[in-house]
Amino acid sequence: MNISVELHQKDLLVVNGIIKGEIDAFTAPILREKLSEIDLKENLQVNIDLTDVSYMDSTGLGVFVGFYKSINASNGHMELIGLSSRLKRLFDITGLGEIMDIQASSGEVKIDETV
Amino acid sequence: MPQEFKKQYKEILEKYILRQTEHNLYEGQNISRQLIQKNISPEEVISIHKASLEEIMSDLPEEVWHSFDLLIEVMVRYGLALKEHQTLIQKQQNIKMEMELAANVQQTLLKTKVPNLVDLDIGMISVPAKEMNGDYTHFLHDSTHVGIAVADVIGKGIPAALCMSMIKYGMDSLDGAETNPVIVLDVINRIVEKSVSDSMFISMFYGKYDTSKSEFTYASAGHEPPLFYCSESSSFSELQAKGLLLGVIPNVKYEQHSIALKKGDFVVMMTDGVTECRSKEGFIEQQTIMDIIENVKDQCAQEMVEYVFHKLEELQDFEQRDDFTLVIFKKV
């Protein structure tokens, strides 16, 4: 039941975010609130690092879908990086992996290749 | 009101001033319960204390009586906070009652009947984690087809429940059980996409069994893939079908596939309440779930789903975090 969300405005049109912990029904509202603080300027690029997210459920997906929709509406772009194989599977099953820009964490990819 | 307590309080105070025993102190605890029950505010209690003390020890210095007046003033806010607290408790009880009512209405509204077929044995279990179920199952059937929708509304509680009525509305507007899964998903996606808020969406699996061909045709909108058990090879495989969640974008292409069911084969449809089970040691692996199912593969479908639910409940230490739905179609 813990989450930490850090957002850094890198320059005018780039925001880098790092999320750590679990994203579930309890913590998702915190994440939603944090993301809603981002000023969605035209052509904004938001990169979110999920390397240290140990668990995410469908409520968490809901937050990213909501954010994806609003950033797209302002011609911006969201990229999720460092997804564990479990998180990657969640995005793949839901079909979101095909419309969103997601990157598996490099470590996890190696493990997948050896399987 | 406070007067009747005054006499009682004075006696208790007198006794305690005389002898500070556990028993006399305990009498104070008892009367405090009665005072709370009768909604007597903290400042009134201090007034009673002051009045009683005046009668017992009238010769106390003036300053002591003044200090009580200050204390009474200080306690006024506490009295207000207490009143507010009581109103909130009342409100909360009302909301709880309304929730229970709403959950009942939901159950009646969304009730689906498990069809009875000669060559297909169907088992179903759906257990909500809270009052309102965010999982939804619906059957359509005619003489030769059975349609099954298994959906999970993301977002929980009341909004999710309202969202489900939309799926039901979409299903009711279809031509019947013969409709192809991709059409079903497309229709419902259009309804949901128009009407749902940005961070709410639905994952849904739709399958159709054709009794004349013993064929199971399916499509998925971002839903957990069902497991298919082939009795000939005694092995499980996932029934994958690509497709985006309902309610994200208006035009989605869904994949549709078919498999033939032979005697003893079965399809296990579920929501993520089944696959995202967690025990103390971590996630319960898919292999564990397969093993549990395989243990009871020869029982009837209803016994199978109930067995799996109880086994997983046990593994999770009876702490159900998410709505749990499991449906089995077994060819007999």
Image (tube, coloured by chain):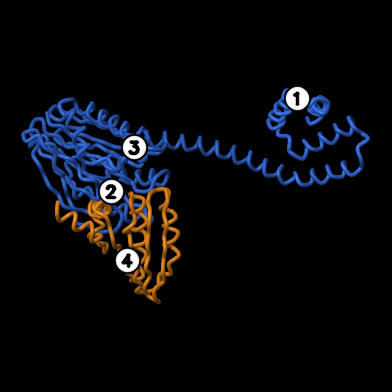
Q: Which chain is orange?
A: A
Q: For residue B110, which quarter of the picture? A: top left
Question: Marks 2 and 1: which is nearer the front?
Answer: 1
Disc 1, SS: loop
Disc 3, SS: loop
A106 left or right of B93 in image:
left
Residue drawn at the location 26% of the way across and 51% of the way down: A86
Pointer 2 with pointer 4, Cβ within 8 A: no
Provide the residue designation for mark 4: A78
Find the distance from the CA under tag 1 to the CA under tag 4: 71 Å
Disc 4, SS: strand
Q: Position of residue A66 (x, y in %)?
A: 36, 59
Question: Marks 3 and 1: which is nearer the front?
Answer: 1
Provide the residue designation for mark 1: B21
Q: Amino acid at mark 4?
A: Met
Q: As rendered, which of B89 and A53 lies closer to the eye?
A: A53
The chain carrying label 2 is: B
2 and 3 marks on the same chain: yes
Tell me: residue A93, above or below residue B325: below
Q: As rendered, which of B314 and A111 lies closer to the eye?
A: A111
Q: Amino acid at mark 3?
A: Leu
Q: Earlier in the sequence, mark 2 or mark 3?
A: 3
Find the distance from the CA under tag 3 to the CA under tag 1: 63 Å
Provide the residue designation for mark 2: B203
Question: Marks 2 and 3: which is nearer the front?
Answer: 2
Q: Amino acid at mark 2?
A: Ser
Tell me: residue B318, above or below residue A27: above
